[in-house]
Image (cartoon, rainbow, N blue to C red):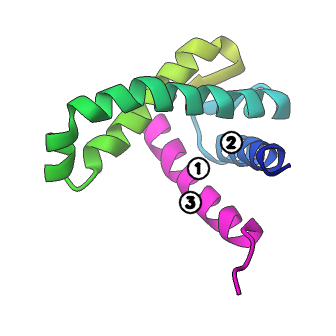
Amino acid sequence: MHFILSLLLTGLIIAGASYIIPGVSVAGFGWAIITGLVIGLVNGIVGGILRLFTFPLNWLTFGLVSFIITVLMIMLSSTIMGNKFQVDGFWSAFFFAIAVAVMEMILGAMVAPKSQ
């Protein structure tokens, strides 16, 4: 049940961020959910390998390289998804990544179970 809720929230966040950020478009809510899955898989597999190889540089830049890798994985996901999820360029992907991170932080705090 938690996975389904997380998937729906991710779709909502991606749809909202694509509406806010110019240069990013998604074909609909269903495609926003699929886009979330694709971004997660690409970021987990390809991004994980890149983070492993760039660990020393990532450590020196306090994680900036990791964020750049995330932006590049969003651009790769756009290429994989074709016209269902489109990102116009690096800066659109950059601001999209920031918007998604901020929205996930806000919604995650609102939905997360409160520990007592």
> Which stretch did the figure color magenta?
89-116
Q: Quadrant of residue 46?
A: top left
How far across and how far down the image is residue 39, in percent? 57, 30
| Above/below status of 72 relative to 66 | above
At mark 3, the secondary structure is helix
Does dot 2 land on a helix, a strand or a loop?
helix
Residue shown at the point (59%, 63%) measured from the top left: 105
For label 2, the residue is 14
**Residue that sits furthest to the bottom in the current view:** 116
The magenta stretch spans residue 115: yes
In this picture, residue 45 sits left or right of residue 67? right
Q: Which residue is mark 3?
A: 102
Q: CA distance from mark 1 to mark 2?
A: 7 Å
Q: Residues within 10 Å of mark 3 (few under 14, many from 20)?
A: some
Q: Name the residue located 78 percent from the left edge and 26 percent from the top edge.
A: 31
Q: Position of residue 71 (x, y in %)?
A: 42, 36
Q: Is residue 50 left or right of residue 71?
A: left
